[in-house]
Image (cartoon, rainbow, N blue to C red):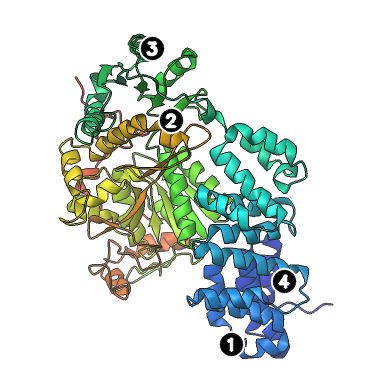
Amino acid sequence: MGQTPSPAEARLNQAMASQDPKQIAQAQMQLSTRLKGTQRIEMQMRSLETAIDASDFTLANNLLAQADTRPQWSDYAPRRAQLLAGFAQWQAGQTDQALNSVSNLPLPLTAEEGIRRLSLMAAIEEAAHRPIDAARQRTALGGMLSGAEADTNQAALWNDLNSAPPQAIADAIKSESNPVFIDWLGLNLVYRTRPGELQSWIQNHPNHPAVTSGFANMLTGQASATAIPMPTGNGPIIVLLPLSGDYQTISKAISDGINFAHDRLGLAGDRSVQIMDSGETLASFSQALNTALAAQPSVIIGPLLKEQIPALNNIPGNAPPIIALNTPSDGTALPPGIISYSLSPDADARATADQMIKDHKMTALVFAADNGLGHRIADAFTHEYTLLGGQILDSAYFDPSATDFSTQLRSLLQVHAPRTGVFQPTIRTDAEGIFLGATSQQSRMIVPQLDYFGADQLPRYGVGMIYNGTPNVLADQDKNGLVIPVEPILLAANAGPNDPLLGTYERASLSQLPRLFAFGSDAMLIASDLKTLLGHQPLTGLTGTLTLSLTGEIDRKPAWGRFKQGLLQPLEGTDTHNIPSTVLSDPDTPTKAAQDKAAIPAVQPGAEQQDQTGTPPAAQPPVHPDDRPSETAVPTFTDGGGLAPAPTTH
């Protein structure tokens, strides 16, 4: 009979069966504590390499701190030791030394070592904000990978190139010698500046990896922006908004922003602005659109409502540029030649996924509302996050009308607490962040409950509709620690008297909806300077940095803020610090967390006994008085301009 494996060996076998690199790396390090000599050295090195190969650099850094055989690594396996030493230098902030160590490994390298070397070099270059250098490493790496790994690397390579300015791409082409990388650069430049030539590029490069993998063909289906016409003549800019009815308040804020950009900022000063009532139905918008077209405008802005967008399918071929302030409800593309600009929560969710990866949060939980909007937000986040190499550990959905989320949060966080005594919960340790697909009202209830159940130091991220742009310390202190994408103008409210956007923010706040005011102002910015966008150059607006994608959508790069002591403050760089939670009276003193948790009244023993048997007790989290559910639901506008107060009713 074979020898029974030890608990540590059994855990490693179980992790290997699950094919979860994080579990495998942790189990390898745990098993190493039972080994001696070269076996211990080998297992500890292998543990770090497993985490690095999975691009889980936070875990690798934690495992590095646990390794007690590092002095022996150079004698045992010099090449592997040098690569791990380079990783340690990178984690210590010594970027140049790290690149030198990793790039100059003694030859010959095994295939596994070669892949690990290039992957790590690319990650270091990306972290140092050198995207072209990172893409160069990923080009070399692509020749060593296949299947899903090759696809993931190719997506990362393309993201690197897209984050570099077109001029930098053009300059790199002149100095490069690797023909495969030169062609990657050329493809990116064609895609961003001459999309009409994509098909010709594909025909001229039949053996390039971008073509043989199908990646380049995918790009050709995204080039609808080439049909967008330039404005002609000095006809008026006509804006179609629902000026009466349920969306009157929202349209007023947007039109205020449009008029501000035209009258005060001088945008499109050679043309007049006419704002017309589009009504709230498809028929009313179609009628208003025909009236607008008859006035021979230079640009049309609208519609605002999703249900009105199908009217754009019938526009004549000689129509002027049209800037829709929303996206189709079914996720389909707009007709060719139409520009789509919105503050869509879906786009915010994708931006948040990018930010979490930049913040080195590589494993995440998702907690979203169980409705159409919540699922859309969660799906958008999940798709982008996994594409960038992140791992979704678990997802949960809550009733949008609920105030108690204890059952879902206990399961999602894997909460454990003693059956008796002071309620001091512990949560799962594999999650590096949590994404909330929630509204402002829901977030004010969820965040305190996260803190109550022991997740007060778990980084939490959300979408821009969590904040309407008006500071409210009393309400927003229940969002402490939450990181969100935000329009730059909204950060001016708390930035001090010297902020250059403060005056504009004060004007925007008069509309009661400063976020939508900024949305309207940037719609006018787009209408006034389409030439810059069609030339694939960015515009700096009140809602962020705006660029035009090949699909005709305005891509918006937002600013980032984090709630601290009830105020949304600018987020500097990457988020690597302890977060200010709702249970900490001093957000900058993380050691008080345990003390404050101990001060929370103990849960009744009976309830905790139920918890031990798998039945969650009723939660006792703090609930903000404004978050009590209302008796009647009111319509809200949650796409074109984000969450707004209840529309005026008549």
Query: Measured from the top left, where is residue 492 in percent x and y?
Result: 22, 51
Residue kind at label 4, given as amino acid type: Glu
The quadrant holding residue 260 is: top left
Compare marks 3 and 4 and give the one earlier in the sequence. Answer: 4
Residue kind at label 2, given as amino acid type: Ser
The quadrant holding residue 215 is: top right
Please name which of the two marks, 4 or 1, marks the residue nearer to the observer: 4
For the question of whether residue 10 can be seen, the reply is yes
Left-right relation of 498 to 333:
left
Q: Which sits in the foreground, 419 or 525?
A: 525
Cα separation between marks 4 and 1: 22 Å
Query: Measured from the top left, where is residue 599 in percent x and y?
Result: 25, 70
Kind of element beneath mark 3: helix
Residue 286 tag number: 3
Cα separation between marks 3 and 2: 18 Å
Q: Which sits in the foreground, 255 or 628?
A: 255
Instruction: Say which residue label 2 marks.
Output: 340
**Residue lying farthest front?**
174
The quarter of the image holding the C terminus is: top left
Please name which of the two marks, 1 or 2, marks the residue nearer to the observer: 2
Q: Are marks 3 and 1 in contact (CB under 8 Å)?
A: no
Kind of element beneath mark 4: helix
Left-right relation of 327 to 451:
right
Cα separation between marks 4 and 2: 46 Å
Instruction: Say which residue label 4 marks.
Output: 113
**Is residue 436 depicted above or below 547 in this figure?**
below
Residue 68 tag number: 1
Compare marks 3 and 1 and give the one earlier in the sequence. Answer: 1
Give the crowd class for mark 1: few <14, some 14-19, many >=20 residues within 10 Å: few
